[in-house]
Amino acid sequence: MNTIPISQEPKTAHTLIRTQSYINGEWVNAASGAVFEVTNPATGEVVATVTDLDRDDVRRAIDAAYDAWPAFRDRTAKERAVLLRKWFNLILEHKEELARLMTMECGKVLTESRGEVEYGASFIEWFAEEARRTYGDVIPANTRDKRIVVTRQSIGVVATITPWNFPLAMITRKVGPALAAGCPVIVKPPTETPLTALALAVLAEKAGFPPGVFNVVTTAHNVEAGLELCENSKVRKLSFTGSTATGKLLMKQCASNLKKISLELGGNAPFIVFDDADVDAAVKGAMASKFRNSGQTCVCVNRLYVHERVYDEFVEKLTKAVTTLRVGNGLDGDAQIGPLINEKGVDKVKRHLADALEKGARVAVGGHELGGLFFQPTILTDATAEMIIAQDEVFGPVAPVFRFSDEQEVIELANATPYGLASYFYSKDINRCWRVAEALDYGMVGINDGMISTEVAPFGGIKESGIGREGSKYGMDYFTEIKYMCFGGIN
Ligand code: SIN
């Protein structure tokens, strides 16, 4: 395995760097004057010092969004679509700058950051188009003198709490449909990656969104800010991506005013390779899905189940592919695997590994720390259901490979988790493909495909992986309320 040296980040003049929050069309500091640091996980260097809002500051952002709502909601869908389209164009025009910024604050390798800018922008483009298709219904009435009409109305102020693993795309996937539906938004980015969110605000301002419609609140007071966003009744909808534990807490907090919520939470994705699969295609799919963002996505493969007849062949080919991966600072163009986000992430990987080895797993490749927050991409063979790695979300570049012999057995193993986000399997038998796809207890199933994320399809999970869907034609539903109007006395 090749480890490329960690170079110093070139001090590029980023025109998109801001360190103040963006509220009501203005760049503002915390009333307290407090700040927090953003560090580059690849080098430990401080990238920027950002204003640290408290609960009262966040409340001011909510007030601004609430005041902006009536005028924004009353714009035509086409007017909102035009604004979104301008924003989309600006995001793509600044692709390189955004990508570098993202890599600096979250460590993701540059090629993936560039891909994320395109992926993130695609939600803005998609919902610019969907804005004008927020149709209602006319329902045949129950009596002759009535007419029944159903419309969809903007839900109101939307708060989004977004994760560090996709600093841009998880914002646009939520904010795109919200803005399309006429909802002002408050974006609370994570403490690790506020700069990409602020850069999006620079571009939203340039695109011409009215003051109060797009707000970014940066804070290290995560608990207090979360409480305000959940408990303030001016916020009508909360959309969160992050851990299942935090999702449960936010749901409880939102219960105080029955706020609508969308939750995109943890996963524990199985990846099944049947004995009739194209093994080379399965290896390619596993590489794409397992090692994206150094294994730090909620749709990353967590458990590889391989039929005993193709187990050795699959492990050999996967090991060979992993051996070629280059680990390094994401800003070095050749790196394919960046650092983990923080010490906690590295500790978790080490804990999983130690437990698996103690319970009989063997390392086919990798298995070591590389210093700082870097960890070797690792394949573990002879994994079993008793290992913690079989139950926990890994969120790192470690892939345990389990052996199975029977279709029903592997479906049961795959479903034996409280999570239900993404799942994958490889088979050339069309009957099996339908059978297994229908039997997997997951919101998303990749069949002979390891990369299922796209703006045109509904992203989301069942069980403890969340509530709601993002992207696609279904994405708008979560930012509108249905209104039924009954016209009586018609003759
Ligand atoms: C996530 O990890 O939360 C999102 C992954 C994706 O959109 O593909």
Image (cartoon, rainbow, N blue to C red):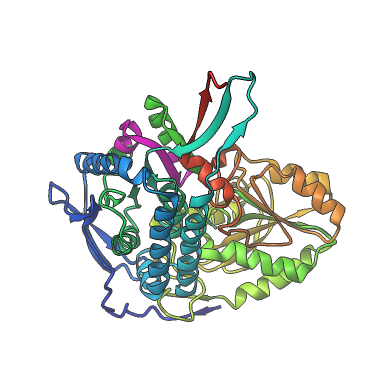
Q: Residue at x 42, y 27 (%)?
A: 258
Which is nearer the eye, 364 or 70? 70
Q: Nearer the viewer, residue 269 or 143?
A: 143
Which region is colored magenta?
227-247
Residue 279 appears left or right of 337: right
The x, y position of residue 227, in whole percent, is 31, 35
Asked whether the viewer can see residue 245, the reply is no
Q: Is residue 359 above or below residue 95?
A: above
In the depicted view, which residue is nearer to us: 7 or 159?
Answer: 159
The magenta stretch spans residue 74? no
Q: Is residue 244 magenta?
A: yes
The reply, left or right, for residue 165 in relation to residue 228 is right
Please give the count of numbered marks on the rendered protein: 0
Q: Nearer the viewer, residue 108 or 455?
A: 455
Residue 281 lies left or right of residue 256; in this view the side is right
Q: Name the residue rendered at 55%, 22% in the picture.
A: 490
Does residue 237 sit above or below 127 in this rendering? above
| Residue 289 appears in the figure | yes
Q: Quadrant of the N terminus?
A: bottom right
Quarter holding the C terminus is top right
Instruction: Point out residue 48 in the picture as x, y percentages from the top left corner.
Output: 24, 65
Residue that lies at the very extreme toward the front in this rendered image: 491
**What residue lies at 30% left-to-right and 60% top-to-bottom?**
208
**Rendered view: 148 above or below 463:** above
- Percent across and percent down for residue 212 are 27, 48
In the image, is residue 278 above or below residue 65? below
